[in-house]
Image (cartoon, rainbow, N blue to C red):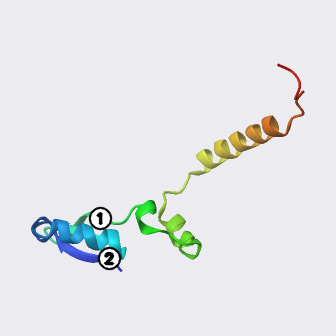
Amino acid sequence: MPKLLSVTEVVRHFSELISRVRFYGERIVLTKGGKPVAELRPTLEASGVRSGDLPSFFAQLPHLGMEEAARFAEDLDAARRILTSPTDRWAS
């Protein structure tokens, strides 16, 4: 569960909060006027994500729309055809 802090509190303790995010993997939601406006969280590299954490990581990513998903699938099929097509390994 992310911790809610006002922007003012974050400014006053920024270095400490960055350390908490970096070393303890904490997530901090910044609020302005009581409303969430931004979030501090570790990057994938800094968080040392374990394989068991991947489902929740992927759940946070934006999802493709139907058209985007169809185009992506077409791109994957085209790449597979190119990669699996027979080639003359001796041709230069």
Residue that label 1 marks:
39
Horizontal side, residue 91 vs residue 55: left or right: right
- Location of residue 23 with respect to 61 vertically, above or below: below
- Location of residue 85 with respect to 32 vertically, above or below: above
- Location of residue 65 with respect to 26 vertically, above or below: above
| Amino acid type of the residue that numbered disc 1 sits on in the rendered structure | Glu
Indicate the position of residue 21 as horizontal and vertical percent values: 31, 70
Indicate the position of residue 8 as horizontal and vertical percent values: 10, 67
Name the residue: 9% across, 68% down.
Answer: 12
Residue that label 2 marks:
2
Q: Residue 2 is drawn in which quadrant?
A: bottom left
Indicate the position of residue 78 as horizontal and vertical percent values: 75, 37
Mark 1–mark 2 CB contact (< 8 Å): yes
**Could you say which is closer to the camera, residue 6 or residue 10?**
10
Q: Residue 74 is drawn in which quadrant?
A: top right
10 Å neighbourhood of mark 1: few (<14), some, or many (≥20)?
some
Name the residue: 70% across, 46% down.
Answer: 73
Q: Is residue 26 visible?
A: no
Give the total of numbered labels: 2
Name the residue: 40% across, 61% down.
Answer: 43
Name the residue: 13% across, 68% down.
Answer: 33
Q: Residue furthest top?
A: 92
Horizontal side, residue 80 vs residue 15: left or right: right
| Amino acid type of the residue that numbered disc 2 sits on in the rendered structure | Pro
Horizontal side, residue 89 vs residue 83: left or right: right
Give the structural element (helix, strand or loop) at label 2.
loop
10 Å neighbourhood of mark 2: few (<14), some, or many (≥20)?
few
Indicate the position of residue 27 as horizontal and vertical percent values: 33, 72
